Image (cartoon, rainbow, N blue to C red):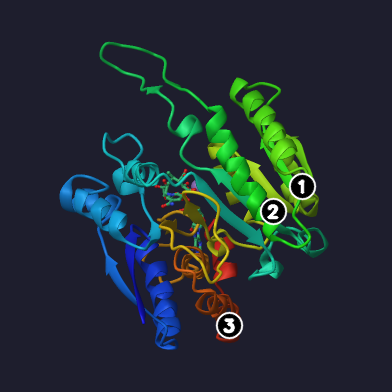
Amino acid sequence: PKSFRVVLLPGDGIGPEVVAEAVKVLEVVSKKSSDFKLSLESHLFGGSAIDASGEPLPASTMKACQEADAILMGSIGGPKWGVNAKVRPEQGLLALRKTLGLYANIRPASLASVSLLDYSPLRPEIARGVDMIVVRELIGGVYFGTRKEQSVEPDVDVAWDTMIYSVQEVQRITRVAAQIALAANPPLVIHSIDKANVLASSRLWRKVVTETLTKEYPQLKFDHHLVDSAAMVIVSNPRKLNGVILTENLFGDILSDQSSVIPGSLGLLPSASLAGAPSVPSPNFKPTLGLYEPIHGSAPDIAGQGIANPIGTILSAAMLLRYSLGLEDAARPSSSLCRKFLIAQRQEGMDYGQRIWEAK
Ligand code: NAD
Ligand code: IPM
Ligand code: MN
């Protein structure tokens, strides 16, 4: 059997809790198949790595990730490490994404996989039938531009961050969105989201998206939306944005959390971060390194209580099997296991969905 190395980065807060549940699913699916073996190894990352070694992404963790076939992460960060500290857990995550060149972050927010529709604050007739995939540019924009911290000594009362995009950066993420759109039958519509009425980087974004799609993918339909009104549409008439939502780093961060309201919980949504378009499993599938994580954070308000919803992480593990290892047959049951989890929780009166909204 083929053997794959999967690095686990449980991280902080609810991270270890949700990763433990996903590992159970990975163990079940790998036991059921004689075609492949998974070797799972955990490494320090985030706040717990700062506590142990002084840095959020120790060299040993980075090396293990570079040598792995795929990485499954929980979440990092929390009040213990604050936002004002010099060394912060989040820096480790940004460095990991950047070092591995993972510019394409794919966040499906579809009701097709699993949902807690009856817990969605949206009326069912509004939330029903939503099927959107956020394709978020992950290693550019304001996250990675130059910035200046406000300093007390000498007293400076400004701070700044710069949002930079190059033509090449926009082209490559547009191609990823296009390939995802084309993999569906019929092809999905691409909704590109920007703030071109104000930002220069967004005007470049809009121009390059238009040129790339028109020249290279004339068969695809696409439109442009300004991010403020798109945010309104996501919670008032989300089906209007069914298809692929193509957007830059910060807008994608915000809109993907917002889109989790539709299926009913932030705890449900998975993600894959790749250095290109996901390759569709096929006989000549080439394994590609990817980082897989739920879209939520370390949820300090519920950590340690055993009530964190693990489904976003389990679905991330399913994406890992599919996109990095090419194991479609193993990936599919993971989604149905999620559905069973949801039903079982309800039967036992253990309802994550309700607690999630109560925790807010
Ligand atoms: P969060 O995503 O951790 O939590 C937001 C809310 O959603 C909380 O009420 C939380 O209890 C709830 N929630 C999140 N995941 C849940 C789950 N699986 N099941 C049930 N409820 C869930 O966002 P936050 O509180 O703003 O951030 C906390 C920390 O997490 C910060 O340090 C932030 O930087 C970090 N963070 C990390 C990641 C990551 O590791 N990829 C992502 C987002 C935020
Ligand atoms: C996410 C998180 C990260 C981001 C943080 C923790 C750096 O919010 O993965 O969505 O902003 O990308
Ligand atoms: Mn986020």
Q: Do the residues labelled 2 and 1 touch (CB within 8 Å)?
A: yes
What amino acid is found at the position of numbered circle 3 in the picture? Lys
As displayed, is residue 83 above or below residue 261? above
The x, y position of residue 39, in whole percent, is 30, 74
The x, y position of residue 338, in whole percent, is 56, 76
Q: Is residue 350 visible?
A: no
| Circle number at residue 181 | 2
Q: Dot 1: what SS?
A: loop
Q: Name the residue under label 1.
A: 220
Distance from the alpha carbon under mark 2 to that under mark 3: 29 Å
Q: Residue at x 35, y 12 (%)?
A: 156
Distance from the alpha carbon under mark 1 to that under mark 3: 36 Å
As displayed, is residue 350 above or below residue 291? below
| Circle number at residue 340 | 3
Q: Residue at x 44, y 27 (%)?
A: 145
Q: Which one is closest to the eye, mark 2 or mark 3?
A: 2
> Mark 2 or mark 3, which has the lower sequence index?
2
- In the picture, residue 2 is in which quadrant? bottom left
How packed mark 1 is, by other alpha carbons closer than 10 Å (few <14, some 14-19, many 20 or more), is some
Q: Residue at x 50, y 78 (%)?
A: 330
The x, y position of residue 249, in whole percent, is 53, 39
Q: Is residue 124 visible?
A: yes
How packed mark 2 is, by other alpha carbons closer than 10 Å (few <14, some 14-19, many 20 or more), is many
| Front position in the image: 304 or 243 | 243
Distance from the alpha carbon under mark 2 to that under mark 1: 8 Å
What amino acid is found at the position of numbered circle 2 in the picture? Ala
| Front position in the image: 14 or 212 | 212
Q: Which residue is drawn at 76% across and 50% down?
A: 189
The x, y position of residue 147, in whole percent, is 40, 23
